[in-house]
Image: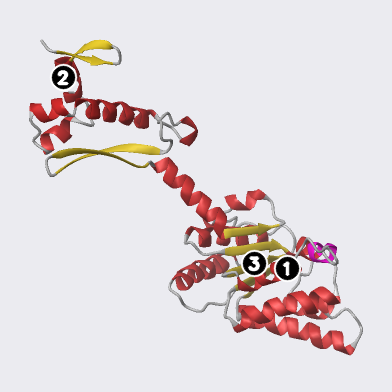
Amino acid sequence: MEEIKFKYSNVDKNKLIDDLLESPYLSNFFIDNDLSSSVVEDNLLTFINYDTEKNRCIECTGMLECKQDNVGLEPVISYEEGKVVSSYTECPYLRHRKRQEQQDQNIDAMHLPSSIFEASLADIDFDRGKNKVEILNKMTNFITLYKNGERVKGMYLWGRYGVGKTYLLSALANELIKNDIKVSIAYYPDLVREFKSSIGDKAVSIEAVISKLKQVEVLMLDDIGGEGNSVWVRDEILGPILQYRLLDHKPTFFTSNLPLKSLVEEHFAKFTSAKAVVRAARIGTRIKNLVGDNDIEM
């Protein structure tokens, strides 16, 4: 009976082959490819290595538990042109991690808690607020049309605190990034504070942030009207951002505690000059043109 040197000990080759023939991963492979005993013997170490690594994958419960030398890769074996070919492919856990990383790159959450990444359109609370079915239908329709390359309006969702406005925007954002659509979602009051505190700070480029908000595929401004008002922010930051997105047909979403009319007349136009009223009206017109008929109370 022939013996081979294997890991510093003499091992019965026939016993190794018998074990491989019972392997759930290799037995069908041998049959499907009609491998002769000589081919199996010539590639014995390749088959043993494959069987060992495949067993590690079957027992694995996630990337943190991976015991492979090449973390996240699972073995693949094939028979091509009379040769046994061993290779590797990304395991489901690694593919999932990469998809998650790609999604994280597609969303820019500014001044919002990490819990927004858990929001889902499937978990909408229909008991709080109103018009949730209409909003859900519009959001679902938006996703379909936007993926198909059509021009679609954004939405202006308004209502009292606690009806789920932020959750809805976050859920929509999560659906969009799954489709490789880049989204910026910002808590507007804190964004305004960031702009104000950055004045005169050469290390912070306000223009870079403005440019990002202008050009991102889908922009979401949460709680507009909740910020401390500022003529400079209204006219030099918000106005140009909305105008750019309007002209470039980029979808823009808003949430607010205020109806759009009140946002314009009571918030943006609260400065008493006639010029302030005109400029506030311009903001209102841009928002109205960006959302069309999707001005919905919650």
Label located before the other in sequence (2 or 3): 2
Q: Label 2: how many residues lie within 10 Å, few (<14), some (14-19) or many (20+)?
A: few
Picture quadrant of residue 154: bottom right
Residues at marks 2 and 3, CA–CA distance in whole angstroms: 62 Å
Q: Quadrant of the N terminus?
A: top left
Position above or below: 8 against 34: above
Q: Label 1: how many residues lie within 10 Å, few (<14), some (14-19) or many (20+)?
A: many
Label located before the other in sequence (1 or 3): 3
Q: Secondary structure at mark 2?
A: helix
For disc 3, the marked residue is: 220
Position above or below: 32 against 217: above
Which numbered dot is residue 278? Answer: none
Residues at marks 1 and 2, CA–CA distance in whole angstroms: 71 Å
Give the residue type at disc 3.
Met
For disc 2, the marked residue is: 18
For disc 1, the marked residue is: 256
Question: How many numbered discs, if any?
Answer: 3
Main SS category, magenta section: helix
Residues at marks 1 and 3, CA–CA distance in whole angstroms: 11 Å
Residue at 81% x, 64% y is 202
The answer to which of 224 and 132 lies nearer the viewer is 224
In the image, is residue 195 part of the stretch drawn in magenta? yes
Residue 222 in picture, x, y percent from top left: 70, 64
Magenta stretch?
Answer: 193-197
Residue 145 in picture, x, y percent from top left: 46, 73
The answer to which of 228 and 86 lies nearer the viewer is 86
Q: Secondary structure at mark 3?
A: strand
Residue 215 in picture, x, y percent from top left: 61, 72
Give the residue type at disc 1.
Ser
